[in-house]
Amino acid sequence: MIRIAAAVIVDEGGRTLLVRKRGTAAYMQAGGKLGPGEAAQDALRRELLEELGCDLAGAPRPLGRFSAPAANEAGRTVEAELFAVTLAGEIRPAAEIEDAIWHDPDDLDSIILAPLTRDHALPLARGLGRRI
């Protein structure tokens, strides 16, 4: 089991921010693995700073804990704590992130999506987008 914290980020147009790690094909939420003894919200803040060069604008809102097959580690399962967040600062992909895109959460076919993103994060993003 791979424990992660990940961000569901939705813009004013209802699109959600997805990232793709260098050398991989699947797009997913920004975020990453929890360190030993690290709280999910602390891991999320650290990962967003490392991956996107952004901090959080306000407290992350917990959306729940979800499991899915890991996109980049065959045979493994990811358990993710997902949070709705707003970013502070300009997005600058860094560390292992090769690409960052704003994606329509209703579009499940134009790009390769990580199972967690397709099955859990995009439905959540659709709901968040309607509230904006």
Image (cartoon, grey):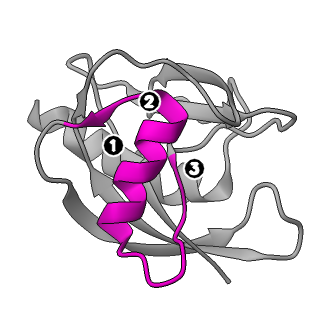
Quadrant of the image occupied by residue 129: top left
The answer to whether 110 appears left or right of 122 in the picture is right
Q: Marks 2 and 1, how far apart in space?
A: 10 Å
Can the viewer see residue 19 in this picture?
A: yes
Stretch in magenta:
31-56
Q: Earlier in the sequence, mark 2 or mark 1?
A: 2
Q: Which kind of residue does numbered mark 2 sit on?
A: Leu
Q: Earlier in the sequence, mark 3 or mark 1?
A: 3
Quadrant of the image occupied by residue 24: top right
Mark in front: 2 vs 3: 2
Q: Marks 2 and 3, how far apart in space?
A: 13 Å
Depth check: 78 or 33 in front? 33
- Residue at image point 20% right, 19% down: 12
Where is mark 2, residue-wise?
Answer: 17
- Residue at image point 60% right, 27% down: 94
Q: Residue 108, image x and y in percent? A: 60, 36
Where is mark 3, residue-wise?
Answer: 118
Depth check: 113 or 88 in front? 88
Where is mark 1, residue-wise?
Answer: 125
Can the viewer see residue 123 in this picture?
A: no
- Residue at image point 27% right, 64% down: 63
Q: Which kind of residue does numbered mark 3 sit on?
A: Arg
Q: Earlier in the sequence, mark 2 or mark 3?
A: 2
Question: Is 52 located above or below residue 117 in the figure?
Answer: above
